[in-house]
């Protein structure tokens, strides 16, 4: 057991709330601060992408006994539903029984704060933290950045305050702090497919719906109330871009032309399109994540990634799993807890950032490419015949808790082998032959 | 001609001072701000690396008629003097008559401020700028970050305030601002070789002296007063590192063992070693560099690089050359001036950052490698026999004003060819044969 400390968690999002539960279970006093109002009291902004909880996420919530409470608000999706022009193709995510789970961010966040309060964490909303004194773990809070501040000192502070973390902002101004933020030229916008009058879903409920169109795409994830949260990903500028859709007519024409089967199910298309903001997508990396035994960053505050692998929340929750393992191992030696936490997580955070970015590139450029589809077919055939030898990368990331860095290395190796396979003369006709299967086997050795 | 504007330049370093001269020549009112005291009134801190002015730098100063004033304080170096154990090897930098020029940073900066004042720029020292309002080009200046500020509004502000720019700091908080800072695990420390009693230099005056030792190295560049400014580059941690030299004895033993011929010429070794700070090395990249027609970053403020190609100042001065070209071309259309300036410079800033980093890696890892030395010999032989076909990368960067991005592409191509050449069986014995020369020629086609 650890000696009880007085700990501040900055950020009442998913990672901050779950971390608060873990810290309470370890016996600490926990104060959670957020600059926003209590999400339980307000309408959630129209800028969210539904979450896809997978193995790493479930592991983290199950370990503190809140898994069932979250399963109650989650919808399993066992397949992609790919909307290509007028046809619909289903593509299972994994083996029989393997699903990812759609959860509305707002619903989950409200539930997590309830659970953290029940565990004894205290929440302080609309508290604007402008700065932190790292050496003394002191928060500086006030109405405005230039106005009067009050100072609150803790034994330790966790920065769970997201990609634009104020806690990290102070750490960035230390020497030897490595940092990068890179925005995609693609943004996103939330849209909505409402429920049928009888409360049922207008599209298959247990699917992750996707309308892949190369540079842009539409996705839809189911909600409990029968609706779907849709997200349109599209470049900011260019031929098919947010800039190219300045008015109601252009939006309606664009959807009619490119997503014809969405027209009937998104009734408030133009209204939502112009009401909801166009949000940006950023990859943020930094190091170190901790300052002595006083400050630690966690979740998006130290590794914000693009959402194209559905792993942002899962990676943040896994931070907590790993942190808790080292709390268990090193007890009151928080210096060692923090050092091992950041050393262990940093390469995995970099790996899932890379994998997520590659998925974006793949979706943007390859999805309609014949050679790409052939590769996927060859991989799938081989994987089905030799499941022990070829676990698809997606499964490794999504349905296992092996380190992301292993998945990245595995993916690189599989790519090398497939590059070689694809150079085989006549591959188009003999892709499903014994010859190709045997060549793959020999390349794997 | 442009309509005269009231322009603030933040930073009175080399780039800020030269930019002030250019803006004065274009008819603008120019106020230069710096948080430090006037460098002309103080001892310069012991943390500088001497500058190596080359073609791009000279072009920028010659264009405003101050080249001669700077040549007067510069010492040509036409070769490297490589101190390997007890022998000394000389390696010319370029063709006959080509030199780079050693200038003390302090001496040059004082001269540049004098010249800028003579051109009519006004300097305001010890003015701490804490923030900037981008949309109105307003500087916020005060004693402390949290204290009272005065606001100064300009038509336009240039941020020439270095790698830790306050102007950029505000831009970083804009959405869609890409940014990275990455520190090397290697730091540096200034040391000094004083003049002989008669004012002559203790080592060859017209050489860039270098003691390459793999992970660490010592360099010495001549000053006008007969001294040399030395810089020790070394990892912070590890076997041969700053951390491994905690006391006078360990420093003296280390130099006696690894730089034996430096002992006699660095009399105050231990004193300087512990008096002078150990400085960090950072590569910083960002984009965009400008905000509307109000704000522009320039020099290290938008592209800080590691010093291993001797191009930091030269790249900053070239920013000014290019900016001035677009001022000439677009006149009062500052939006176009800024857009073309950043579009033109960004890929070149990225290229010299990459080249500088590669030089660090090359010096750290390859300098004692036989294969590496053989490559260099083959390249040199070919370049001498076919100067029209193979301009060494160093010359392309240092003795030309062709874009850095071209040099990087050329270097990549040359590397590919040399990789191929080095796979030739028996290359060790026939490296200077006609066969290798002809193979290189055919690979070039």
Image (cartoon, coloured by chain):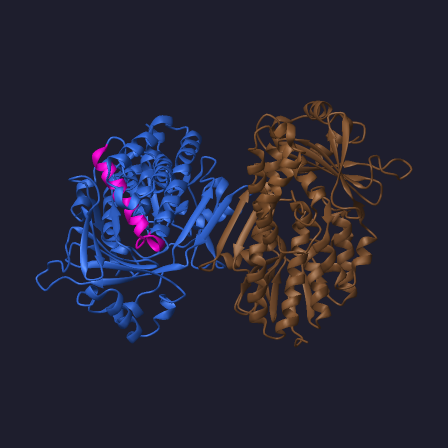
Chain colours: A blue, B brown
- State the residue in front, B47 or A82: A82
Labels in figure, total: 0
* Quadrant position of the C terminus of chain A in the picture: top left
Residue in view at x 51 percent, y 49 percent: B180
Specify the quadrant that holds the N terminus of chain A. top left
Residue B321 x, y percent position in the rendering: 67, 62
To which quarter of the image does residue B277 belong?
top right
Of residue B372 and residue A69, the one placed in the foreground of this image is: B372
Q: Is residue A321 left or right of residue A118?
A: right
On the picture, is B249 further left or further right than A14? Answer: right
Q: Tell me if B441 is positioned left or right of A309 in this view.
A: right
The location of residue A43, given as percent across then percent down, is 25, 61
Q: Residue at x 31, y 53 (%)?
A: A367
Residue at horizontal 23 percent and vertical 33 percent from the top: A387
Examine the rendering and report whether any part of residue B11 can be seen: no
Q: Is residue B409 above or below residue B370?
A: below
Q: Main secondary structure of the magenta part?
A: helix
Figure check: A233 above or below A181: below
Left/right of residue A383 with respect to residue B286 in the rendered view: left
| Extreme residue in the right direction | B198
Can you give x and y, in whole percent of width and height, for residue A5 in the image? 37, 35
Residue B248 magenta = no
Residue A369 drawn in magenta:
yes
Residue B115 falls in image quadrant: bottom right
Residue that extends furthest to the left in the rendered view of this protein:
A198
The magenta stretch spans which residues? A363-387
Q: Nearer the viewer, residue B213 or B37?
A: B213
- Foreground residue among A200 and B279: A200
User: Is residue B315 among the parts visible in the rendering?
Assistant: yes
Percent position of residue B323, x then y: 64, 64
């Amino acid at each position: 057991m650890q000696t009880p400390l007085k700990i501040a968690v900055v950020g009442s999002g998913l990672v901050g709330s779950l971390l608060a539960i873990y810290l309470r279970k370890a016996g600490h006093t926990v104060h959670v601060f957020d600059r926003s109002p209590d999400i339980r009291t307000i309408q959630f902004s129209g800028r969210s992408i539904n979450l896809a909880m997978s193995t790493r996420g479930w592991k983290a919530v199950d370990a503190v006994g809140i898994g069932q409470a979250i399963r109650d608000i989650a919808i399993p999706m066992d397949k992609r539903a790919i909307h290509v022009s007028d046809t619909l193709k289903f593509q299972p995510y994994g083996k029989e029984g393997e699903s990812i789970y759609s959860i509305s961010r707002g619903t989950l966040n409200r539930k997590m704060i309830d659970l953290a309060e029940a565990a004894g964490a205290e929440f302080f909303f609309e508290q604007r933290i402008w700065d932190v004194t790292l050496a003394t773990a002191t928060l500086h809070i006030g109405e405005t950045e230039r106005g009067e501040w009050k100072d609150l000192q803790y034994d330790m502070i966790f920065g769970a305050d997201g990609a634009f973390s104020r806690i990290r902002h102070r750490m960035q101004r230390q020497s030897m702090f490595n940092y990068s933020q890179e925005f995609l030229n693609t943004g996103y916008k939330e849209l909505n497919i409402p429920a049928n009058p009888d409360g049922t879903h207008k599209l298959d409920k247990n699917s992750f719906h996707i309308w892949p169109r190369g540079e842009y795409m539409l996705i839809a994830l189911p909600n409990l109330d029968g609706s779907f949260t849709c997200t349109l990903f599209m470049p900011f500028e260019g031929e098919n871009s947010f800039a190219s859709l300045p008015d109601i007519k252009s939006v309606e024409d664009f959807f009619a032309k490119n997503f014809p089967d969405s027209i009937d199910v998104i009734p408030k298309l133009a209204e939502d399109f112009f009401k909801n903001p166009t949000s940006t997508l950023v990859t943020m990396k930094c190091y170190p994540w901790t300052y002595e035994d006083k400050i630690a960053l966690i979740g998006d505050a130290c590794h914000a990634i693009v959402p194209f692998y559905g792993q942002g929340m899962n990676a943040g929750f896994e931070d907590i799993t790993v942190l808790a393992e080292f709390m268990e191992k090193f007890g009151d030696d928080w210096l060692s807890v923090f050092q091992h936490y950041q050393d262990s997580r940093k390469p995995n955070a970099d790996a899932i950032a890379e994998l997520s970015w590659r998925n974006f590139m793949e979706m943007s450029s390859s999805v309609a490419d014949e050679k790409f589809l052939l590769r996927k077919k060859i991989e799938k055939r081989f994987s089905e015949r030799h499941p022990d030898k070829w676990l698809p990368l997606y499964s490794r990331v999504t349905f296992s808790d092996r380190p992301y860095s292993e998945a990245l290395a595995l993916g690189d190796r599989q790519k090398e082998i497939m590059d070689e396979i694809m150079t085989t003369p006549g591959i188009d006709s003999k892709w499903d032959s014994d010859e190709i299967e045997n060549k793959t086997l020999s390349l794997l050795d």
